[in-house]
Image (spheres, grey):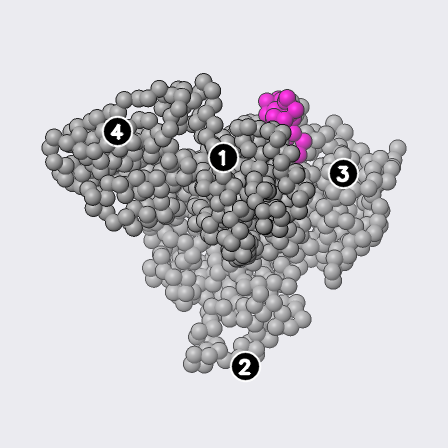
Amino acid sequence: MSPVLELRGITKQFPGVLANDNVNLTLEKGEIHALLGENGAGKTTLMNILYGLYKPTKGEIYINGKQAEISGPTDAIRQGIGMVHQHFMLIPVLTVTENVMLGEESMRHGVLLDRKAAAKRITEISKTYHLEVDPHAYVRDLPVGIQQRVEIIKVLYRQANILILDEPTAVLTPQEVEELFNIMKLLTGQGVSIIFITHKLKEVLAVSQKISVIRRGKTVGSAKPAESTEQSLAELMVGRPVELVVKKKKAQPSKPVLVVRNLFVKDKRDRIAVDNVSFEVRGGEILGIAGVQGNGQTELVEAITGLRHAESGTIQISGQEAANKTPRQITEIGVSHVPEDRQREGLVLSFPIKDNLILNTYYKTFAKGIVIDEQKVNDTATKWVADYDVRTPSIETPAGSLSGGNQQKVIVAREFSRPMKLLITSQPTRGVDVGSIEYIHARIIDKRDEGAAVLVVSTELDEVRALSDRIAVMFDGKLVAIVPANEVTKEQLGLLMAGVPESEVLIKLHCK
Amino acid sequence: MNDMNLTLQEKRNARMGVFFLAISLAIVVFFALNTPAGLTTTFGLNPGAATNAPQLPDVPVPTASTIWSLAILTAFIGGWQLAKGFKNSNIALLFVVLIFVLAFLTWAARGQSMNFLGIVSASLLRAAPIAFGALSGILCERAGVVNIAIEGMMLSSAMVSVLVASMFRNYDALNPATGHPLFPDWFATIGRTLDSLNLSPAVPWYLLIGLLAGMLTGGLLAAFHAWLSIEFKVNQIISGTVINIFAMGMTSFISQRFLQPIQPLNGSGTFTSLPIPVLSSIPMVGPLLFENRFIIYLLFILVIAIHVMLFYTRWGLRTIAIGEHPKAADTLGVNVNRMRYINVIMGGVVAGIGGAYFTLGSVGRFNKGMTAGKGFIGLAAMIFGKWTPFGAFGSSMIFGFADALQQKLQIFSAQVPIPSEFLLMAPYIITMVVLAGVIGRATPPAADGVPYEKD
């Protein structure tokens, strides 16, 4: 029998970039096929071609052995291909039913929408595939895990038998990931074939039947999970041996550097986002903050760094009151900040690298009276670019044209080159390739060992666990637990992140 | 978490209560204490020419005691708001504002009579162009295209519609035979034939042709706006401004060069009032709603039709989708840019009807700059109405009422010591207060004004 889907020699040339270079992929009926690769390796481009969002420069697509012409999402849907995008394609102001039926609306009397009929079909799909969801709920009120269910229902509603999941686990708690894997297995049991895109090695090994690895647009290998290890896959993915474990000595905590007491912060919609949070970070230790995105971590960091108003409570940084000071005042106390969204808050994308490197010191270190000392800027920038291994043609290159990993290194170079007492880093390795992750992690540990207090905020549980000496879990604006990193399992953290009270989590621990 | 939000709500409720009490005090200080005893205010309840509805007797009320009771009622609402709080304090706010207006009217017309329903029906006439503008804005912005060129579209359409309607109406005067060699003989022949056919006696055919020309004008300008903002991703504010400036210059040029010197080109007549049988004889409501000009009925139909289309049809669901998250719609096979073209052009056509209202719907001739910012106020009404047709119509009525009120009060200028200039500002002050967010923040469609790019 011919395979459900076959990609032959897919090549996609963007201006200046060869995103896909002669890629081949075969998907059998009822299998979960993992597509593994670093960010920017060309996985998403390949899937966008398959879904008709991009036109390939070269190559053919065969579905059930027949060549298929896919020139738009409509064609893909007609061929039975459904895609769950990394960034959900849901409209928050519409209900689940409206989101699902959009583009394939049920009608009555020819012109009017038939929401009832659509809701009924959604309920049927929910039941068949154990995808519980209220068809009348507004998407904006649903947690991310449920939104993902809606996305899957959307695909099943269109009777897809080839399902593309693009980085589906990025926004989920470990328990939700487990649930998703069960759903995936259930779907393949019913004859659906799944392409599972990810860069997380553990997940690939846990759920897939076949693995294809893509590097720089090329398929560099395929493997069976039974015959692979995380280490072998990582090497295949990056192209050289990679250190997967963060090496660190035992922490030597000194005096508290950051002391937060009873902090309340509101989010941009005027709701309480940080709810009575108290904690401290000592010099020479790393406190990791774990939590599903949107549980107040962003607002907490913004309040500490002076980017958001603190409603009440105190923030002390090395003995100085820092609540509601300006970012510059806080920077001058000795705080370094690697922000969550590097493109919006960390860099001025249209500025050259050298100007980005002096954004918070230009008026002091690099000033000669009221003008900037260009010579000093150039010399320093050249040195830092070399020291921090920023891969760029020149220090004059606009920050916007660098890759994600190199952009992050520019920020790290800027923030880490100042004398610091406190380092705050949010999602330090989001969208950064494995090689750079290794490098950035090592630098963070270095700073700890030099005596700085470090606050790491990350939604990647593995990262928090690897870096932290202690882990604080945030849920719904509250710090629900602070635990030593080596005494807590991933499952326990997952439960805490999902809002299960600390006492219950500990009981479960004892039962095991 | 809930505790803190609750206190916020309580604070807002308390602020609202104090505001109500202040209004009550204002009614006492400004109106009640300034009213000599023994005067009567008479309210008329027969708008304009009510041909079919039974005439209603005027309602005389004792001025001073009426104002006092309104003040006490407001104080009571304020007290209730402070003590217990209304479930929906915005409705209480609306109610209090209405009472204030009523108290003001009672005071302004002390010892005289004022046709209250007359003001309401004048409000509708003044609200109509604003409402057309707002509906046009809804069609565009729901699909994610900001259209500030509604003003220019209305102005152009106002001119084109009167020009075309006049040409067809005055074909005799524009003939070589009468000394105006503008149009050849066959043109007059067409006109005479259509005249003799007497297709629609209630609505003259040349006005309908004028209206269509106006709609076409609006549609064409909108197509241009859509082309610039979708195809070339030009900043939509700039594209809109360009169209506004173009419309202003073009209309004043044509008006000066042709419409002013050749009067037969600038006299179309207007739609006449068409009472709807039966419905128009309902007292009060009848003459207000069912004894209007053709183009006002068109407005009513559009408000309802756009509401139904937006919330109950495939087109509506897709429109909302592409205005909120075009990429999501695209991945489901909705053609985002084609939908945007269609919607913007439809918006232009509606703006065209609004433009024709200025000429064919009210005075029958074109004057330079006659839209006077109504298109922009329409956008304010759209925002105030939270991008819904009924909301937009309601807010247009508020703006229209402010406008009609200042007109009416000029009659009472002897006993209302407010300079008429200030009264003229009233609609605009209301616009500003409304935009500053008395009613609460209005959230535009998420992708409003953002061109759609497929990476």
Residue at image position (46%, 52%) is B369
Q: Which mark is residue B43?
A: 4
Q: What residue is disc 3 on?
A: A75
Secondary structure of the residue carrying numbered label 1 = loop
- Residue B179, image x, y percentages: 58, 50
Q: Chain of mark 4?
A: B
Tell us which disc is closer to us: 2 or 3. 3
Q: Which mark is residue B271?
A: 1
Measure the C-alpha gap from mark 1 to mark 2: 76 Å
Looking at marks 2 and 3 on the same chain, the residue that comes earlier in the sequence is marked by 3
On-image quarter of the N terminus of chain A: top right
Whether pointer 4 and pointer 2 mark residues with C-beta atoms closer than 8 Å, the reply is no
Q: Which mark is residue A205?
A: none
Numbered range of the magenta stretch: A97-121
Residue at image position (66%, 39%) is B189
Crowding at dot 4, Cα within 10 Å, few <14 / some 14-19 / many 20+, comes out as many
Identified by mark 4, the residue type is Phe
Identified by mark 2, the residue type is Gln
Identified by mark 3, the residue type is Asp
Q: Are marks 4 and 1 on the same chain?
A: yes
Q: Above or below — where is A47 with respect to A235?
A: above
Residue A103 shown in magenta: yes
Measure the C-alpha gap from mark 2 to mark 3: 57 Å
Examine the image and state in which quarter residue B232 appears. Answer: bottom right
Q: Chain of mark 2?
A: A
Crowding at dot 1, Cα within 10 Å, few <14 / some 14-19 / many 20+, comes out as many
Tell us which disc is closer to us: 4 or 2. 4
Q: What residue is disc 2 on?
A: A375
Q: Chain of mark 3?
A: A
Residue A403 appears left or right of A445:
right
Tell us which disc is closer to us: 3 or 1. 1
